[in-house]
Amino acid sequence: MYYFFYIPVGTEASVRRTPWGTILLAFANIWSFLLFQLAAGLEPEFYRLTLRAGEPSVATAVTSSFLHSGWLHLASNLIYFGIFGPPVESRIGTVRFLFAYLGCAGLSNLSQAAWVLRAAPDLASVPIMGSSGAIAGIMGLFLVRLYFVKLRFAALTMLFLQGVARGSRFALPAVAAIALWFLLQVVYQLVEPTAGTAYVSHLAGLGFGAALGLLMGLAGEGRMERRIIIGNRYAERGEWFAALGEYDAYLARHPADPDVLIQAARVHRVTHQTARSMDRFREAIGRLLRSGEVSEACDAYDEMKRLLGDVAIPPADELRVARGFEEAGRPTDASRAYEAYGRHHPDAPAAWTALLKCADIERARLNNPGRAQYICSEILRRTPPPEIERMARERLLKIEEALALQRGAA
């Protein structure tokens, strides 16, 4: 006897923002399942909310997509939803994602009801439920928008007579994987048309999702993003200039994408185009800060420093990064960024206070009085304004007293 089980475990499509729509819909499915499983006396309400081919309605076509017959039914749907939902939502936005999900849910379930009335009218009173039609719709959107990515799978092969059970992983292009899934649904529908699984809903959901994706113009967006994926594959193989060609072609149409700017900056660094790498890091950090993604900007700044050394970015950006490090509880990075701001932009209004901030962090947060002493001494050597000189001398005096106490204790 031979059995082969597989399950999707991920994709190479990035998800940068929190997929709140996916989380909300997953929570709604889990909550409704627990409610009807654990609360007593709700069987009539459960039945009323399910779609039945003999009494179809748009409302029950949607509500039935949040109802499941058991844990396995729910878990299998949520696994697929967790794989395909976040990358799609991050590209089309939460509002459009929610409308697409609910629309595909209703249309796919109504398609199943129409097939039941035509092919198996004796099942007209049997409830049609589950989110698989809606999730198939999201797979259709994925197919149109992200057809070029690969899907990763975990598999289990079992040969009972030989006593073999072997796990494995493999990847398939999304087009091939979804096409195989589609063919399996067709085969199951032909072999077991009334087995209790809504295969017509699956097929209809995929079709409606793909059609909706085409109407939304996702195919054109996908063709541009395909350049990023191909560029990443070139970079993984060390084909740096081919990777840059793909990144540059994408950035020519989408110059504001900070992720691709950072990817291009890394490749520029590897190919010894230091000035170009620096420019793209600066641009990416600026765009991240302007969009409110301070944590991501700080990470990009940290990477830029590690790859390129002591380079400067515009003063307002460097100061915001320093504050971002401090707000994130990264005092070492904050100290270095404040010091860099003070050294790189000595004529900026906040340059002196940035250096004082650096000294305060070294002394109070990092317990590094020697470093704080050095920073205060540097401030005094530069002939600061009188108020800054006074504050630097006060700090230096406290630091020297603390160092003297340490030496005495030793």
Image (cartoon, rainbow, N blue to C red):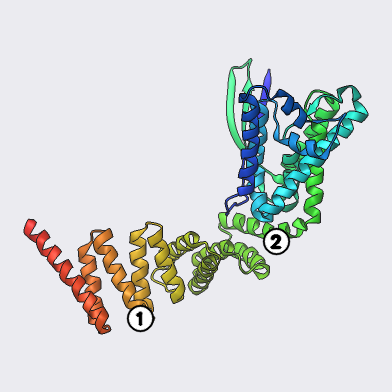
Type of amino acid at the residue the image marks with label 1: Pro
Quick one: label 2, few (<14), some, or many (20+) residues within 10 Å? some
Q: Secondary structure at mark 1?
A: loop
Residue with the mark numbered 2: 224
Type of amino acid at the residue the image marks with label 2: Met
* Quarter assignment of residue 151: top right
Query: Which of 4 and 301 lies nearest the eye of the viewer?
Result: 301
The C terminus: image quadrant: bottom left
User: Marks 1 and 2: which is nearer the front?
Assistant: 1
Q: Residue furthest top?
A: 161
- On the image, the x and y values in percent for residue 122 come to 89, 21
| Mark 1 vs mark 2, CA separation in Å | 42 Å
Residue at 39% x, 68% y: name it.
309
Q: Answer above or below: position of 70 versus 100.
A: above
The N terminus: image quadrant: top right
Numbered label attached to residue 123: none
Query: Which of 59 and 75 lies nearest the eye of the viewer?
Result: 59
Tell me, yes or no, if residue 146 can be seen here. no
- On the image, the x and y values in percent for residue 234 come to 61, 57
Residue 230 located left or right of residue 334? right
Residue with the mark numbered 1: 346
- On the image, the x and y values in percent for residue 102 come to 74, 44
* Quarter assignment of residue 32: top right
